Image: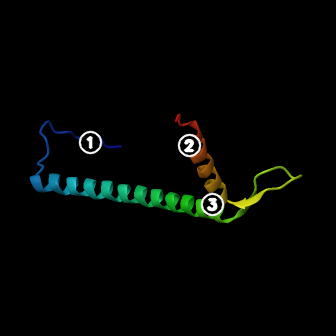
Amino acid sequence: MKATVTTPTAPDVSALDVARSFGKCLVLCLVYVLQCMAKAFGLAQRAALGACLWLNSRHNFTDKEDPVIMTGWQYLGFGVLVVFVAMAVSVKW
């Protein structure tokens, strides 16, 4: 195995070499950010589709003896109605 010889002087690095390396670094950072955004958008799309599926499908919100079957929209609507009535009742006249 042959030993490598090191020189005490720094190699000649031009401004063009530095700019080229900086440009490559910026392109790699941009590609990484775009990949992360695509992954986040895919996750958001899956979450939105899951929420739409839950809101539009019918669910049993009680036990099996006396079932109350309603969609997610109806469940949220009743929740909003209960909050509104509870706030109206709690106001001191």
Kind of residue at disc 1: Thr
Residue 69 in which image quadrant? bottom right
Q: Which residue is denoted by mark 1 in the rendering?
A: 4
Mark 3 or 1: in front is: 3
Within-10-Å neighbours for mark 2: few <14, some 14–19, many 20+: few
Kind of residue at disc 2: Ala
Q: Position of residue 16 (x, y in %)?
A: 12, 56
Within-10-Å neighbours for mark 1: few <14, some 14–19, many 20+: few
Q: Which residue is denoted by mark 3 in the rendering?
A: 73
Q: Is residue 29 left or right of residue 89?
A: left
Mark 2 lies on a secondary structure that is: helix
Q: Residue at x 28, y 59 (%)?
A: 27
Q: Earlier in the sequence, mark 3 or mark 2?
A: 3
Mark 1 lies on a secondary structure that is: loop
59 vs 50, nearest the viewer:
59
Q: Earlier in the sequence, mark 3 or mark 1?
A: 1
Within-10-Å neighbours for mark 3: few <14, some 14–19, many 20+: some
33 vs 91, nearest the viewer:
91
Q: Position of residue 55 (x, y in %)?
A: 63, 61
Q: Which residue is denoted by mark 2 in the rendering?
A: 88
Q: Is residue 83 left or right of residue 39?
A: right
29 vs 47, nearest the viewer:
47
Q: Earlier in the sequence, mark 1 or mark 2?
A: 1
Kind of residue at disc 3: Trp
* In the rendered image, the vertical position of residue 12 relative to residue 73, given as above or below: above
